[in-house]
């Protein structure tokens, strides 16, 4: 996610803008920039691809003037690859107004076309660049009015910082869908994407709400609605430290990241499904090449591997292409059978996992095209692949992968739809139904998260068990494996994910009253079979925790504990069952006093073999 800082006050803005921006680096970014107004109201902008130190080196030699107001930004690319030109701040074509933006302007193309007709010149590939040009087109002396008129034209999400040559002692901020906080200082005021950036300068903050605009000078902060109505600001005093601030009130980053999933998935869908049409920017392979694909090979590790297993069901069901899924550590040593007609999908949150990097290199050496599905922009895997599909889930700090996993799942469904479109393997009506059900997933996830305390009670009631089995069938067999991994890696409880149909071939010998068995059984064509497995477990006094579709009246007698998820297309159910599985693991680990964010022996990215 992008990071925003703004300053207006008696001190020199530039060092404050850079120092505060560095405190947002943990959010992950690929470029940075700063814009400010000097004494003569000249608008000065400097920006650079890469780390903030690149920006500092760029301006080190210059004797930049003292400035009272400015904005700075770390960019997490969504439209347009990482580059100096695409970095923020962006200005209007006459260089009077500069903005920094976090979010996605969904209707930027039509706005850009209209502005071009008025003679605006654009230099970047970003959606954000339309904003300063729109403000300039409305500006007739009242900056706040021009900003309000601009906002009225924007569709999508944004947190904005705005400065103007005509108003050298003013800073304007606005938000909808992306966080922004105002800091109240002594003869200075600030804006920031979140509190850690300004906590060393002030503890008095206003958490901007969606639909609010803040107008800051060094001595005053005024709040307005987008409609122009004045709002009395509520000033909070921050009592926690910086690390706690980054958790935004959650006890662990993992819980924060679990709760970020609806927004992450909504952002992915608004970026990749524009007006319900697929937009896999970065795929890098034209349709005619995709048409020649005869097999898909997925290489990944851990949670990413489980996402690949779900992806197999999605791609095979929708595109009828055969899919093989292999752990990277096995793929690289098995003399794999891949060639130029094999599409290799290398999946890695970090993009730095040694085994997956090596597997991707092995596949390319054998003539296959490699598409990376990554979360960290500019990572090694992203740079080496033939195409890159970023999940843009924002930096994932908890070692146990949560939002990156569901974002990987979402990406697999989109890739499956793309392959189905190219191969015409799916009836238009089916494709339309799947897309409309995909678009509902973020709100269904929000409903599940509301059920958190019920899941916590179930976790507490089962946290004493010394061994867990996770069972699922078909597309939720991988969900069972992912649920087991989540639990074992943060609670250290032995846990195994199994295909439920395999129970009678051995694992059922494990079942007794000392075992907890999580049975994943949402409505599906294998529901009855899975219900029989649940009965077999209860007949042997196993403790069953069921995850089932809300309103299922038959499941009750087969379970000791029930967690309900909303109904969706059965192929999409892993997106929903992932959340209770993550929360079960989280609450059991917390109950056991484990270090949820940094479990023993584990690293966030395994960059060695
Ligand atoms: C998942 O919770 C674990 N942290 C681990 O299995 C992880 O998924 C695996 O190491 C792969 O990491 P990557 O996605 O960064 O390649």
Image: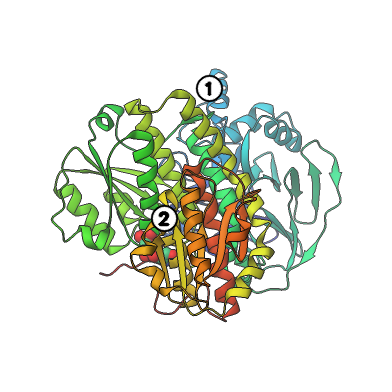
Q: Relative to 135, is 216 on the left or the right? A: right
Q: Is residue 297 above or below residue 599?
A: above
Residue 137 image position (x, y, % from top left):
64, 27
Q: CA distance from mark 1 to mark 2?
A: 48 Å
Residue at the extreme front: 539
Query: Which residue is the site of mark 2?
Result: 477
First in sequence: mark 1 vs mark 2: 1
Within 10 Å of disc 2 (Cα), the crowding (few <14, some 14-19, many 20+) is: many
Residue depicted at x 81% and y 37%: 228
Name the foreground residue: 204 vs 582: 582
- Between marks 1 and 2 in the image, the one whose residue lies nearer the viewer: 2
Q: Is residue 382 visible?
A: yes
Query: Which residue is the site of mark 1?
Result: 113
Residue depicted at x 41% and y 34%: 417
Rendered-image quarter of ligand 1: bottom left
Within 10 Å of disc 1 (Cα), the crowding (few <14, some 14-19, many 20+) is: few
Q: Relative to 10, is 560 on the left or the right? A: left
Residue 354 image position (x, y, % from top left):
27, 63
Question: Is the residue marked 2 within 8 Å of ligand 1, measured from its CB?
Answer: no
Kindly state the secondary structure of the residue where label 2 is placed.
helix
Q: Quadrant of residue 352?
A: bottom left
Residue at the extreme top: 117
Which part of the image, by quadrant, shows the C terminus?
bottom left
Name the foreground residue: 459 vs 389: 459
């Amino acid at each position: 996610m992008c990071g925003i800082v703004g300053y207006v006050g008696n001190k020199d803005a530039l060092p404050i803008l850079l120092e505060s921006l560095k405190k947002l680096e943990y959010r992950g970014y690929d470029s940075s920039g700063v814009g400010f107004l000097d004494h003569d109201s000249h608008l000065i902008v400097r920006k650079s691809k890469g780390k903030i130190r690149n920006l500092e080196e760029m301006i080190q030699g210059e004797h930049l003037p003292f400035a009272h107001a400015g904005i700075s930004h770390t960019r997490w690319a969504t439209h347009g690859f990482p580059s100096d030109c695409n970095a923020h701040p962006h200005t209007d074509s006459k260089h009077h107004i500069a903005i920094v933006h976090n979010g996605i302007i969904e209707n930027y193309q039509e706005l850009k076309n209209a502005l071009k007709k008025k003679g605006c010149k654009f230099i970047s590939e970003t959606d954000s660049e339309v904003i300063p040009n729109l403000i300039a087109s409305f500006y007739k002396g009242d900056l706040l009015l021009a900003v309000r008129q601009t906002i009225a034209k924007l569709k999508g999400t944004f947190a904005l910082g705005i400065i103007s040559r005509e108003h050298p002692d003013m800073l304007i901020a606005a938000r909808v869908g992306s966080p922004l906080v105002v800091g109240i200082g002594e003869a200075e005021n600030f804006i920031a994407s979140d509190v850690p950036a300004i906590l060393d300068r002030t503890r008095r903050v206003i958490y901007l709400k969606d639909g609010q605009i803040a107008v800051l000078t060094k001595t005053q902060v005024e709040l307005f609605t987008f409609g122009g109505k004045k709002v009395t600001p509520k000033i909070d005093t921050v009592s926690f430290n910086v690390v706690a601030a980054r958790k935004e009130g959650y006890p662990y980053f993992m819980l924060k990241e679990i709760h970020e999933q609806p927004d992450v998935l909504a952002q992915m869908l608004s970026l990749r499904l524009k007006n319900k049409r697929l937009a896999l920017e970065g795929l890098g392979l034209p349709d005619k090449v995709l048409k020649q694909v005869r097999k898909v090979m997925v290489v990944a590790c851990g949670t990413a591997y489980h996402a690949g297993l779900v992806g197999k069901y999605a791609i095979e069901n929708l595109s009828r292409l055969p899919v093989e899924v292999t752990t990277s550590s096995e793929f690289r040593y098995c003399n794999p059978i891949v060639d130029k007609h094999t599409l290799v999908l290398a999946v890695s949150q970090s993009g730095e996992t040694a085994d997956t990097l090596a597997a991707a290199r092995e596949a390319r050496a054998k003539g296959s095209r490699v598409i990376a599905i990554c979360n960290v922009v500019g990572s090694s895997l992203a740079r080496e692949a033939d195409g890159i599909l970023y999940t843009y889930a924002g930096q994932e700090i908890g070692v146990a992968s949560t939002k990156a996993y569901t974002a990987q799942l979402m990406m697999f469904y989109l890739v499956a739809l793309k392959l189905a479109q190219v191969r015409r393997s799916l009836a238009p009506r089916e494709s339309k139904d799947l897309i409309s059900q995909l678009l509902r997933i973020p709100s269904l996830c929000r409903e599940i998260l509301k059920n958190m305390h019920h899941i916590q009670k179930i976790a507490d009631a089962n946290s004493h068990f010394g061994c867990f089995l996770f069972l699922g069938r078909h597309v939720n067999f991988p969900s069972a494996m992912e649920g087991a991994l989540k639990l074992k890696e943060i609670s250290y409880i032995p846990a195994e994910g199994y295909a439920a149909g395999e129970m009678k071939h051995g694992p059922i010998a494990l079942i007794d009253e000392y075992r907890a068995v999580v049975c994943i059984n949402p409505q599906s064509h294998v529901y009855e079979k899975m219900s029989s497995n649940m009965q077999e477990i209860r007949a042997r006094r196993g403790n069953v925790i069921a995850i089932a579709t809300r309103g299922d009246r038959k499941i009750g007698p087969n379970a000791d504990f029930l967690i309900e998820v909303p109904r969706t297309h059965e192929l999409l159910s892993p997106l929903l069952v992932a959340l209770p599985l993550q929360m079960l693991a989280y609450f059991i680990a917390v109950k056991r006093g484990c270090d949820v964010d940094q479990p023993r022996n584990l690293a966030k990215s395994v960059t060695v073999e």
